[in-house]
Image (tube, rainbow, N blue to C red):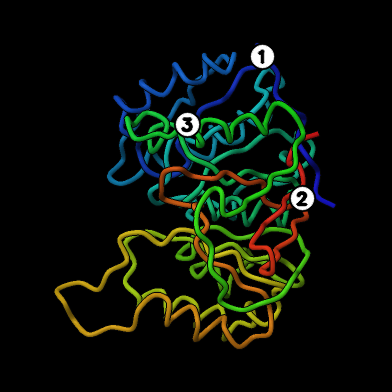
Amino acid sequence: MKIRPKRLKKGDTIGIIAPASPPNIDQLNRSLSFLEELGLSYRMGKSVQQVNGYLAGTDEERLEDLHEMFADPNIDGIICACGGYGTARYADQIDYQLMNENPKVFWGYSDITYLHTSMNLYSDIVTFHGPMLASDVGKSTFSDLSKKMFLQLFQPMELHYTEDISPLSVVSPGVARGELVGGNLSLLASGIGTKYEVDTQGKLLLIEDIGEEPYKVDGMLNQLRLAGKLNAAAGFVIGDFCDAEPKRGKKSLTMDEVFNHYLGDLGKPALKGFLIGHCQPHFAIPLGVEAVLNTENLTLAILPGVE
C-alpha cells in the first residue's frame, strides 16, 4: 500500500513549482484566483519565473524548489504550473527519502509523469495526475468538471468514471483490479531501460499523449511490449490522444488499429475514451491506489488518494 498524503483543508498553503519548462506567466497568474476560491494560500517556487531555454531555470534550481516544497512543514501540497520537458534530467538526484518522510499532495501530468513514476517506485507515495495551473486552470477553456476534480484533495472519496462523462469503448473485454500507474506514454517509453521504468506487474496502466502520430504511438507501445510491460499489466486505461492525426496526408494506420494490435489480444481488459490527459474536461486521478476496470459496465472505480 502506498502512503496517502494528508487531505487539504481551507487555509492550507500550496507550493507552486515548474519542474520542467517555464510556464506562461499570464495564465499562471490567472489561475491563482481558483486556488483562492478553494480556500488555499500559495507560495511560488524560486525558479517558476526563470527561463533557461526550454527549462524553467537550471536543473539544480528546479530540483531545489521540489526539495524545498517537500521539506517545508508550512507547505501542505504541491501543484505544478506546467509540464513541457525536463523532469527526467534530475530524476537521479531527487531525495526520494525526503518525500517518503514528508508525504503531501503532489499534482501534475504530462512531463510530470516521469516524477509520478519515480516517486511511485522510490518514495512509495500516492501522487495525482491532474490539470496544472498555467497549462489548464488559467485558460478560458478550463471546465467545471476539471474544477470539481480538485475536491478529491479535501475529502477522501472514491472516483467513478462512467459513460456519463464520455463515451467509452472496449478494446479487450474483462474485469481487472490493481494499482493504477502510468500517465503520458512518451515519458513512460523514455524511462524504459532505466531505473525509473514504470512497474506494471499486476497493475492497471494509464496511457495518454498529445501530438503523436499513430506510427509514433505504435513505436512507443512496441517498446513497452518488448520490455514486457504490456504482458505484465492487469489491464489498460486508455486516456485522451489528441492531435494524433497523420501529418501531410500520408498513409497510416488509425489510432484504433494501433491500440487493437497491441492491446486487443493480450486477454486483459482495455477500455478507451477516458477524458484523462491533454483535454478538457480533464478527469484527475490519484496514482498508486487500487482501482477496478470493468468493460462489462464500462466503468473505472478508483479508491481515494488522500487520508
**Residue under label 3:** 144
Say which element carries label 2.
loop
**Residue under label 1:** 10
Residue at image point 72% right, 45% down? 126
Say which element carries label 3.
helix
Q: Are marks 3 and 1 in contact (CB under 8 Å)?
A: no
Q: Nearer the viewer, residue 281 or 56?
A: 281
Q: Are marks 3 and 2 in contact (CB under 8 Å)?
A: no
Say which element carries label 1.
loop
The single residue placed furthest to the left in the displayed view is: 248
**Residue under label 2:** 124
Q: Nearer the viewer, residue 134 or 206?
A: 206
Residue type for callout 3: Asp
User: In terms of image quadrants, where is residue 181?
Assistant: bottom right
- In the displayed structure, does residue 25 sit left or right of residue 147? left
- In the displayed structure, does residue 245 sit left or right of residue 128? left
Alpha carbon distance from label 3 to label 2: 31 Å
Which of disc 1 and disc 2 is earlier in sequence? 1
Q: At which x and y percent is residue 139?
A: 33, 31
- In the displayed structure, does residue 36 sit left or right of residue 266? left
Q: At which x and y percent is residue 24?
A: 31, 33
Residue type for callout 2: Asp
Q: Of circles 2 and 1, which is in front?
A: 1
Residue type for callout 1: Lys
